[in-house]
Amino acid sequence: MLLLLGCSARKRHDTQPLPAILRYDGPLYQDLRAFLRRRGWPPALRIGTFSAEYGLIGALAPIPDYERRLDSERAAQLRSTVLATLARWRDLADRTVLVAGSLYVSSLLPALQAAGYSSVTVVPGAIGEKRAHLGRALQALPSVLQTRHDPVDMGRRTVFFPDWEDFLDPDFDFLTEHFSGPPGARRRVHAATALGEPISDGILVSLAQRLTHKGLLKQLDRADPRSTAPQQLRQYYQLPDDAILFGDCGAFSYVEEEEPPITVSEAAFLYHIYGFDLGASVDHIPAPYLPLPERQRRLQLTLANAAAFLAEARHYGSFHPVGVVHGLDAADYARSTALLIEMGYRHLGIGGLVFRSDREIAEIVRAVAAVRASMRRRIWIHLFGIFRPKLQHLFEESRVDSFDTASYYRKAWLRSDQNYLGVDGRWYSAIRVPVSSDPRNRRKLLQRGIRPEDAVELEQQALRALVAYAAGEQDVESTLDAVLAYDSLIDRDDLARRDLRSLYRRTLLARPWEQCPCVVCRSLGIHVVIFRGGERNRRRGIHNTRLLYRQVRNGDQCFPADHE
């Protein structure tokens, strides 16, 4: 069902843009939100709203407050854009229900007919009759609310993989370097599920994606068909039933802003409709480099938001609210922890730790753990954005329950000497064979006067040499000669002081890919240690993360040294 509503009275106390379904506050919108709160968002329901300012837009499209009323002149001005939007929405549903005032109906109905909508119901009568008809139409839709996972029930430390659109092509051909199809047609699997076995206990997804053009929650134009309904995250990531979905606000993405761009009401609503198991309160990081009064203001704002967010979360009752703990020092973190527990939080996430040294983190974790130890209730504690191998013993002693990190995943391409984690617990360098057709590499080659065809030939010789070495058909020194003959053509400041030959020789002689039983290493062979393009690099990151996850699951405290 495509439900089309007219705009209504607007909420004006929120200075940030709000999804249209939250921006408008008339009786129909109140009824609709009450239904969604009780039943969740049915898969068959699509919602659009006719705004005097923006025309026909999806109910999830964020809009700021505005001053404009619909009249005949404005309706005529919007006719062409409304027709264009209806053409984009034609296949969303097999029937359309129009619930709006007379001026909205007189504008939308001819447009629906002109756009070819054949099954349109116009709800007649005064507001009471409209509300009753809307209620009956909604009640015919199935409830989708399900019991949400609680990591406390797992009885062990949980690991979350923070997502930022880490998808890959499972059918990529590493010999021919061909994808399975064009970007919009190829099959995609997420890094967290690509292996066929878990590399984490769940995924951490940031609502801050709504501020960007990347991710499921990314910014869309207001008339995009995807803005008419939420896509369920569990389906999007193809997660197993027991995986946990954890949402946060991505405070690092707006640390330079005066105010969080996500409101408390919006955060709670999004956690609810997208099916999150855990949802973090709206925080604002009191970063150490900020002036002291601003840091103190942010600390108080985070606590005030936490109190308001807990009330909103209880209003929905569909996800476990996580209070975000911040502080200026360890004592502040302890006070904030006590206040959040007093508010009623049973799940806490310690934020702002990425800025901190190991010594500072140790002090903070001990202070928070001491507060928790004084409580009779079971309090679950998560560390946002860090792993810190040297502190794992302390985290175990302090009964830290959970953490999220992508450090082992992203080291696959962000370091020159620690890209591949061997099953022997040692880090190895990946062997760089840059893609010559990459615009940046091509520009560097041209600046050095190297013809593209010559570069391609050296590139292919390097790849063939590595494959031959893995098959036992070429010795290590001649393989290194071929690799470095090409690699040396592309100037990289970050590697200028590295002895690449020694780093690469160590990797080749150890042949670590042959020791690992994971699907990535068994299927890719030497390609898993070739630093080249996202398909290889992401798979290497998956391999690294799998080993980290297995170490945590096995209670191993001996982690390889690294730097986050």
Image (cartoon, rainbow, N blue to C red):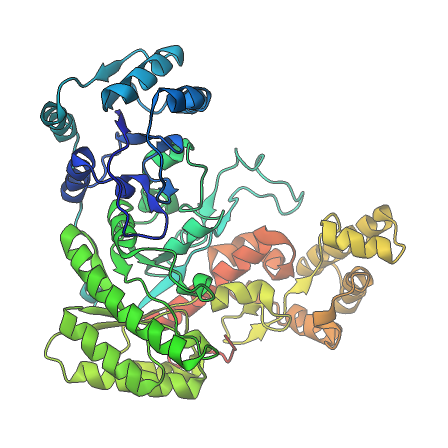
Looking at the rendered structure, the number of numbered marks drawn on it comes to: 0
Q: In the image, what residue occupies the spot 58% across and 72% down?
A: 418
Location of residue 550 with respect to 70 vertically, above or below: below
Q: Residue at x 58, y 35 (%)?
A: 182
Most foreground residue, 90 or 505: 90
| Residue situated furthest right in the rendering | 449
Residue 486 position in % (x across, y down): 80, 59
Question: Where residue 387 sits: x, y (%)?
Answer: 41, 74
In which image quadrant can residue 491 be found? Answer: bottom right
Residue 150 in view (yes/no):
no
Q: Quadrant of the N terminus?
A: top left
Depth check, front residue: 527 or 349: 349
In this rendering, the answer to whether 4 lies above or below 214 is above
In the rendered structure, the answer to whether residue 391 lies left or right of residue 178 reads: left
Q: Nearer the viewer, residue 61 or 364?
A: 61
**524 with respect to 280 (left or right):** right
Residue 505 at least partly seen: yes
145 in relation to 45, above or below: below
Left or right, 395 with respect to 421, comes to left
The image shows residue 356 at horizontal and vertical percentages of 44, 81
Q: Residue at x 22, y 86 (%)?
A: 370
Q: Position of residue 31 (x, y in %)?
A: 15, 36
